[in-house]
Amino acid sequence: MDWINPLATVAASFAGAWAAFKLQSTQQKNEEVQKNITAANRTLLTLMQQVNELKLFQIDQLDPYRESPARHIQILPTLPYSTESLKFDFQSLSFFNTKGGFQILFELSVEERRYIEALKAINERSLMMRDSIHPMLIAAGFDEKSLYSKDDYLNALGESLYMQLKRLTNQVYYHVDRTIDSIYEMNERFKTETKKKYPKATLVNFEFASDVQQQKQSDSLKYGDPDQD
């Protein structure tokens, strides 16, 4: 029958087109999944860079003087930290469009704000040390390699500036210590939520080597009161 061949041709053409469509659809879906996993890994990398920056500052600047009563004088100023360079690309994380996903994005935005506040505290204290404290101490004849009594510093700086520096130093300890811990927690939370969406995803992992061997101090000792004198 002559009409069978045309029908078979049409059927074969349709089947081929449908197969091509399904293949393209699957490829697009796989590409979308890979793009989302890449965005998640970029977020984890940003968290790693944030904690690495703060952890190095903690080890080099804060830990050596943590128990010193003169730590507000001893910690040297640093070059300004950029508060714009390590931010999250929230637009690339739009695949978190579920209730739990929106929550993790909110927590991520809070974490970013916390990191920025830690850098601002460091920068503000460094600026005070460079522009006010060190010039006044040098003018008063202080040797920066020596330590003096509290009364000596009070006489050189005045009580208001002295206490302001002490409070600001306490705030630096508070913000840096707290943010390091919260970034570690955020890292685990974010990986958990990503795995819920993409169980087979390969996600980057980070661990600060020196922190593995260091036992955590209690929150009361480590954080303290950022406004205490």
Image (cartoon, grey):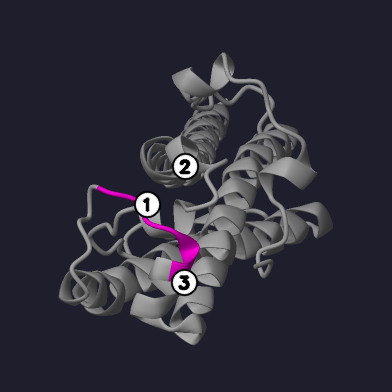
Q: Amino acid at mark 1?
A: Gln
Looking at the rendered structure, the secondary structure element under dot 3 is helix
Q: Which residue is mark 1?
A: 74
Q: Are marks 2 and 1 in contact (CB under 8 Å)?
A: yes
Q: Nearer the viewer, residue 49 or 90?
A: 49
On whether residue 148 falls in the magenta region, the answer is yes
Q: Position of residue 126 (x, y in %)?
A: 32, 66
Q: Amino acid at mark 3?
A: Leu
Report the Cα–Cα distance between label 3 and label 2.
15 Å
Tell me where residue 156 sits by quadrant. Answer: bottom left
Q: Residue at x 38, y 38 (%)?
A: 56
Q: Which residues are magenta?
A: 146-151
Q: Residue furthest top?
A: 213
Q: Circle 3: is it few (<14), some (14-19), or many (20+) Cα within 10 Å? A: many
Q: Is residue 132 above or below residue 125?
A: below
Q: Is residue 156 left or right of residue 10?
A: left
Q: Residue at x 44, y 75 (%)?
A: 154
Q: Position of residue 150 (x, y in %)?
A: 48, 63
Q: Quadrant of the C terminus?
A: bottom right
Could one spot residue 157 in this view of the protein? yes
Tell me where residue 79 sits by quadrant. Answer: bottom left
Find residue 165 and name its label: 3
Find residue 65 and name its label: 2
Q: Circle 1: is it few (<14), some (14-19), or many (20+) Cα within 10 Å? A: some
Q: Quadrant of the N terminus?
A: top right
Report the Cα–Cα distance between label 3 and label 1.
11 Å
Q: Circle 2: is it few (<14), some (14-19), or many (20+) Cα within 10 Å? A: some
Mark with earlier residue (3, 2): 2
